[in-house]
Amino acid sequence: MRRAVITGMGAVCAIGRDIPSILDGLKHGRSGVRRMEQWSSYKGLNCQVGAPAELTGEKLIPRQNRRSMGRMGIFTVQAAEQAVADAALDRALLTTGRAGSIVGSTMGGGEAISEAFEIMVPTKDISDLPPMKFFQCVAHTASLNLAQHFSIRGSVMATSAACSSGLQAIGTAADLIRLGRQDIVLAGGAEELHATVAASFDVLFATSTHFNDDPSRTPRPFDRDRDGLVCGEGSGIVVVEEYEHAMRRGARILAEIAGYATTASGLHVSQSNGESIIECMTGAMAEAGVDPTGIDYISAHATATQQGDQEEVAAIRRLFGDRVPVSGLKGYIGHTLGASGAVELIMSLAMMKNGTIYPTRNLENLASDCEGIYHVREPLERKIRTVLKNCFAFGGISTCLVCRTL
Amino acid sequence: MTDQDIVRMTNEVFADTFEVPAEDLLPEKHMFNDLGLDSLDTVDLIVALQKKFGVQLRSDERVKSVRTLADLYKYIGVVMAEMKTRAGGGH
């Protein structure tokens, strides 16, 4: 059977615009969460904090490629450029038709969608609608822009399952490689921070609202005082490559994508379900041929919502007890939603490479409903061979990926 | 609005929207061959010019024959003059 491996990775998020700066942010416990001053104009939006990534260097992307990109398109291409360089990949290999692009996001370009409606709706007139807006809005904006930028001619698609989107993209890339449809896929997730996106969680009372004046103290995964998620933005892209293809060109292999599963609970549109999470984690481990004793680190979804964290901990506790180190990374970078699975997997692979597991930021007082698992509270020097990444999404969707070193 | 105003404002659109360097904004320059625009850019150009000059250009067939910057300056001048006439003598 063909095997899928990761040979390069790149990321942009609130604490850094490349892997070294993100690792430095983790090492120093930095928070990327800020008060979003411009959000105060939205009536009823209780959450006033977000985790913006710095948008810079975009003019390095040729204008004719850049014109169809919103923020998330730019972040995606910047992350992908890092990944391609990290993989020492000859760019000509991306143009053969044997290479594809899969990038997930929650809903496409939130900023462009909002701008387009602001132009069209009040006047019912499309005369002033810039034509490039369409390409910045669509659900596959990140994927199509990535493909255009690298002249990719293989499969170009966008997974869209809210906060599972990015991890589903990487899992789908592995599937395409295993099936023999592609030899290389640039895969990951992208998201841009916008009040309309935060509002969709705010109306469901899922956002953090008690730390608007003290942004760095939220989100607080697994903590007694956790009060919801904080939206972030950015992109994470990995080069997923067929194992023999990577070996032939002498590529350095960061990890194998050993197991992947995505499931749904069929029970509730917004709430996580522990049993369904167990099924998903079990499915990913079964495909990887490991049992819970074979996992060295769990990168939790851990959004810092009451119910979500509780269900995830219950599932981890049941399968792993308190044996496997667990941390959540959203206290550093916010919840990058459709990008989160990819960005946090990349952060976990960087930790794997470094031999240090970074702790759950803002976990100060462990909540009683989150006890019974091995919470990483301080940087932990540990050899990680196998990592399990969790992502859960509206729709009762769970997505889990197991990566291991070779 | 003078002819100089039209040239200046049109050039501003090319600089702001299409990042064309000022030294390339010469009347004889062809929008596609010299300035690097393509068919998608022309729709963006129309929207940007509409906003800049406060006119409607999307449904005007004459815009399709514009090729060089000189053509464009001339065309905008004609459109602005027509608008002035319609408005009753430029009050």
Image (tube, helix red, strand yellow):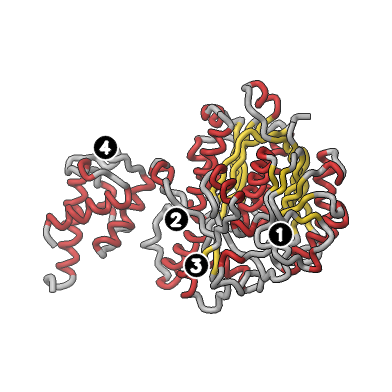
Circle 2: element type: helix
Identify which amino acid the numbered label 4 is placed on: Asp
Task: Quadrant for residue B22, please give it.
Answer: top left
Q: What distance separates the C-alpha of mark 4 from that of mark 3?
A: 43 Å
Do we see residue A309 in this rendering? yes
Which residue is labeled 1 in the image? Answer: A302
Identify which amino acid the numbered label 2 is placed on: Lys
**From what the image shows, is residue A346 above or below residue A369?**
above
Q: Earlier in the sequence, mark 2 or mark 1?
A: 2
The C terminus of chain A - image quarter: top right
Q: Earlier in the sequence, mark 3 or mark 1?
A: 3
Q: What distance separates the C-alpha of mark 4 from that of mark 1?
A: 53 Å
Circle 1: element type: loop
Which residue is drawn at the image coordinates 53% and 49% (left, top)? A16
**From what the image shows, is residue A249 above or below residue A360?**
above
Identify which amino acid the numbered label 1 is placed on: Ala
A245 to the left or right of A373: left
The N terminus of chain A - image quarter: top right
Circle 3: element type: loop
Circle 4: element type: loop
Which is nearer the eye, B73 or A379? A379
Which residue is labeled 3 in the image? Answer: A36
Do we see residue A179 in this rendering? no
Residue A267 placement (x, y as % from top left): 81, 65
Q: Which mark is drawn over residue A133? A: 2
Of all residues, the one furthest to the bottom in this rendering is: A43
Which chain is disc 3 placed on?
A: A
Q: What distance separates the C-alpha of mark 4 from that of mark 2?
A: 25 Å
Residue A319 placement (x, y as % from top left): 87, 53
